[in-house]
Image: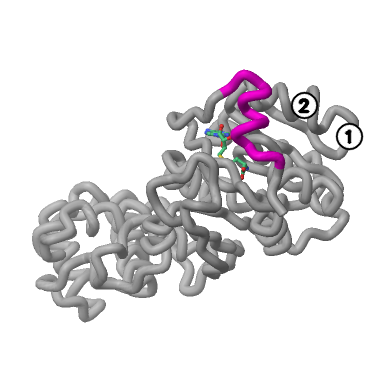
Amino acid sequence: MSFDSPKILLQHLGLKPNRNLGQHFLLHLHQARRIVAALDLTGDDTVVEIGAGLGALTVFLAPAARRVIALERDPNLARFLAEDLFRDTPEVEVVCGDVLEFDFRRAAGEAGQPLAIVGNLPYQITSPLLFTLIREISTLDRAVLMMQQEVGTRLLAPPGLKDYGILSVLVRYHFRLTRLFSLSPGNFYPPPQVESVVLRLLPEVPDPAALDEAVLHQVVKLAFGHRRKTMNNTLVAGAEAVGLTPAQMRLVLTELNLDPQRRGETLSLAEFVALSNRVAILKQGRTGR
Ligand code: SAH
């Protein structure tokens, strides 16, 4: 079964899909149900839905959760959701705004527990959203997100492949990822240019843990700054950016048995953590002096 065609519904509302907001509406009920099912809701959950659109996911979230905060940036769609579709559904609170400015802490505080996050993401905000979720990780219980296949591939890529990057390392440091399923462009109106994939993200206690997460972030950024260069030319040459001298960085690499002729993009997550921990310790010594 399909929804009332999003095309017809939008026409009825006098609207057109806004590509700048990444509007690609789900066409099939069973796909929406599948995404919501992956969230394993209990009737006690508070859900934050990112980009509720015409409510394709929201209609399945509402009966399964205690409360649904449906974020939607487009005021026309937010008005339709609040004043029409969910007018008589008190569990759904429609919030018109940008998810990147949403107060996750306040929502989790009000819920009295960490949040379940779900969304068919507007593709242009996937990366900043993932960094936001890392920052707000203490407020999250779990997330099920649909994103462009290319970003999903980056998140899951093993070290050494060209898709492996800052996002792969930092997201995997904080979350356990599971790839659930893919959806082809024909499942959306209007169809996007690319395939989509649904991932589950579960916050994890990092193992091994970074002594200083800010230093981990800095080291990873420095190592990936010039992908084709060796660590000698990125980490050692740019050591000042993380608060060490080049000689100190060379020492760190030697201590950890990391060949400075390797490229940073070949380092595993565990190697990045070990590296950043040595850097953090040396840095402390330096500022303590
Ligand atoms: N959930 C719906 C719509 C998905 S399309 C469905 O699956 O059919 C993505 C939605 O995110 C659009 O409705 C778009 O307007 C909204 N959106 C885009 N940028 C946003 C942002 N920064 N914050 C919140 N919502 C946003």
Please, is residue 175 above or below residue 18 in the view? below
Left or right of 126 on screen, residue 54 = right
> What residue sits right under mark 1 in the picture?
90
* Residue for point 46% across, 64% down: 173
Q: Is residue 29 left or right of residue 232?
A: right
Label 1 is placed on what type of residue? Pro
Rendered location of residue 190, percent (x, y) = 50, 40
- Name the residue rendered at 59%, 52% in the picture: 137
Rendered position, 228 above or below 129: below
Percent x, y for residue 271? 32, 73
Task: Name the one closer to the observer, 144 or 190.
Answer: 190
- Residue 52 appears anywhere in the view: yes
Q: Is residue 213 above or below residue 127?
A: below
Query: How many residues crowd around disc 2 within 10 Å: few (fewer than 14), some, or many (20 or more)?
Result: some
Q: Residue at x 57, y 47 (%)?
A: 120
At x 15% / y 76%, what residue is drawn? 259
Assign the N terminus to one quadrant of the image.
Answer: bottom right
Q: Is residue 9 magenta?
A: yes
Q: Which residues are magenta?
A: 4-15
Q: Which mark is residue 82?
A: 2
